[in-house]
Image (tube, helix red, strand yellow):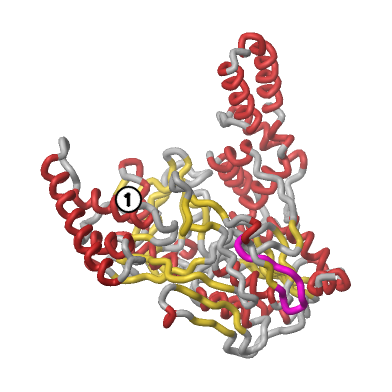
Amino acid sequence: MQHMKKRLNFIIAITLLGIVAFSFTPPADRYFEIAKNLDIFATLFKEVNAHYVDEVNPNHLVKTGIDAMLESLDPYTNYIPEDQIENFRTMNTGQYGGIGAITREFGDRTVVTMIMEGFAAQKGGLKIGDEILKIDQVDLSKVSRKEAGDLMKGQVGEPVSLTVKRFGRDEPLKLDFKREKIKLNNVPYYGMLDQGYAYICLSEFTPDAGKNVRNAFLKLKEHNPKGLVLDLRDNLGGLLMEAVNVCNIFLPKGKPVVSTKGKIADQNATYSTLDNPLDLEIPLVVLINRSSASASEIVAGTLQDYDRAVIIGERSFGKGLVQIPRPLSYNAQVKITTAKYYTPTGRCIQVMDYSHRRDDGSVASIPDSLKVAFKTTNGRTVYDGGGIEPDITVEHDDTHPVTHTLFAMGYIFDYATRYAHALKNQPDPKNFSLSSDEYQQFVTWMKDKDYQYNSRLDQQLSQLSDEAKRERYYNELKSQLDQINAKISESKKNELMLYKDQIKTLLEEDIISRFHLERGSIQAGLKNDEDIKKSTEILSNSNQYKKLLNGI
C-alpha cells in the first residue's frame, strides 16, 4: 500500500502516545504521566518547528512520530490516514470502484497482468499484456505509480478511457469503460483433481468467504469426490468470523472454533459454529505454507485440533493477534491489536513475542523451551507458539535468483504474450505443457536480453573475498577466487536450462492466463504442484490418512 502525506490531528496523535506509553501504571500516576508527556511532546514539537534549521512539515513530522510509536508495539497496530481509508476498506471488504484490471510496472511500462472475470475491463476488450499509455488524457510516463493507480480507481458509474499498446498492433488502441463496484473473488478456482478428488482455493477471508467455499463444495459434491483439498497457501487471513464459517462446513454445529483473550475481560469471546455442517465424513486435506496467516491458521489449527483434516505443506506464518479498527478525527482510523486468539485446544500460535524485546529493540520468536504441548481430540500432541506445524511437511526448492529475475523484469510475462498471440487454438489449462523445443525457443529469445543478477554463489564468493581481505590472505587466494568466479559466470550461461522446471512452470501459467484468466493460471499450476501430489497420495491411502489423524 502506498503512503501519502495528509493533514493529521495533533491532539489525537499525542494522546495516543500518552495512552500507549503509560497504560501499565496505576490510574492516578498514569493520568499524571499522560498529562506530563503530552506537555513535553507539545513543547518539543513547537520548539523544533520554530528553531530547526530547515523548514519542517508538521504533518510529516507527527505522522513519523505516530508510525514510530506504533511500530514499537507490533507490526499490525497501524495508523490509517484519511487518504488511505479506501485502500484499507478494499483489504477488508475485497471491494472497490474500478474496471477490474490488475497492473504491474516493468521498468517504465505499466502493463495489464490480470483481467477479472465479468467486469468492465473484460467486457470492454482490455487484454492481459496491454501496456497502458494513457488514462483518460493523462500520459502515464509523466505521473508516479501511485498517481496512476489513483487514476484507475474512482466513483462507481464514472467513465474512464485507456489508451493501450497491444502486441501485434502498430497503432495504440483507445478503450472506453464505466467504473463499477469490483468485488475480489476470494475463491478464484475450484475443480476436480485427478483420481476423483475435489480442490478449492481460498485466497483471502473477505466477506462471504465461508459462503463461497460452501457453494463451491456443493457444486463439487455433484461429482461424488472421494476427498477434498482446501488450499490456504499464501492466504494472509482476514475476517475472523469467515474463518468460523469455513470451519462450520466440516464441523458440527456448536463446536468452539476460536477464542480471543485480551486486556479487557469483557471483550473476551469464544466463537463457535452456528449452522449445520455440509459434510462431516469426507476425507479432508488443508494446504498451508509460510505465508498462511491469521484466519488461515485458525482454520488449519481448528481442523487439526479436532482431527478433522490432515495438514500438509510448510509451517504457517504464526500470527495469533487480533486487531480492531477505531475511528479518529478527520476520517482517520487506527488499527489496534487488542487480543490474542486461541484454537480449541487452547493453543496460541503467535510466533513473535512483541512484549519482550532485546536491548537493540529487535523481537525474538518464542523459544522451543517455552512452547506448551496440547492434545487434539484423538490425543495427538500439538504445540503453541510457532504457527501451525503441518502433519506432513513437504520440502520445496527455493525459487532460484535467475527465475525471480526473469519474472520481476517481465521477460516471462512478455514471452507469454508473444507465445499466446501466435496460438490459433485455446490451450487446455489442465493439459497444456511447453515442449522441449518450445522451451528452447524461449531460451533462444532470451540470448540478447540483459538480466544481470547475483546468485547465492556470487554472494558467498563476495563474502569470502571480503573475509580474505580482512584476514590478509586475499593476494594468496586471488587466482583461485578468480577461477571460481569465472566458473560461476560460465555456469550462468546454462542456468535457463538448469532451472527449466521453475521457469517453464511460470511460463505455462502465464500463457494459460491469456485465455482462461486467473482460474486457468491456477489450474495450470496444479499439475506440477508437489503439495497437491502429496495430498492425493495421502487421500488415496485411507489407512495412512486414518493413522495420521489418530496419531499412530
- The range drawn in magenta is 375-386
Give left or right: position of 159 versus 484.
Answer: left
Residue ID at (59%, 71%): 298
Q: Nearer the viewer, residue 109 or 245?
A: 245
Q: Nearer the viewer, residue 261 or 52?
A: 261
Q: Nearer the viewer, residue 124 or 212?
A: 212
Residue 159 visible from this viewpoint: no
Residue ID at (66%, 17%): 481
The overriding secondary structure of the stretch rendered in magenta is loop
Q: What kind of element bears circle 1?
A: helix
Give left or right: position of 302 versus 312.
Answer: left
In the picture, residue 464 is in which quadrant? top right
Residue ID at (58%, 43%): 407
Residue underneath mark 1 = 147
Give left or right: position of 130 versus 527.
Answer: left
Give left or right: position of 303 versus 5.
Answer: right
Picture coordinates of residue 313 (x, y %)?
70, 59
Q: Is residue 468 above or below residue 245?
A: above
Q: Is residue 229 above or below residue 527?
A: below
In the picture, residue 316 is in which quadrant? bottom right
Picture coordinates of residue 388 (x, y %)?
65, 64
Residue 278 visible from this viewpoint: yes
Picture coordinates of residue 166 (x, y %)?
48, 47
Residue type for callout 1: Glu
- The quarter in which the C terminus is drawn is bottom right
Q: Is residue 444 above or below residue 323?
A: above
Q: Nearer the viewer, residue 176 or 275?
A: 275
Residue ID at (33%, 55%): 69
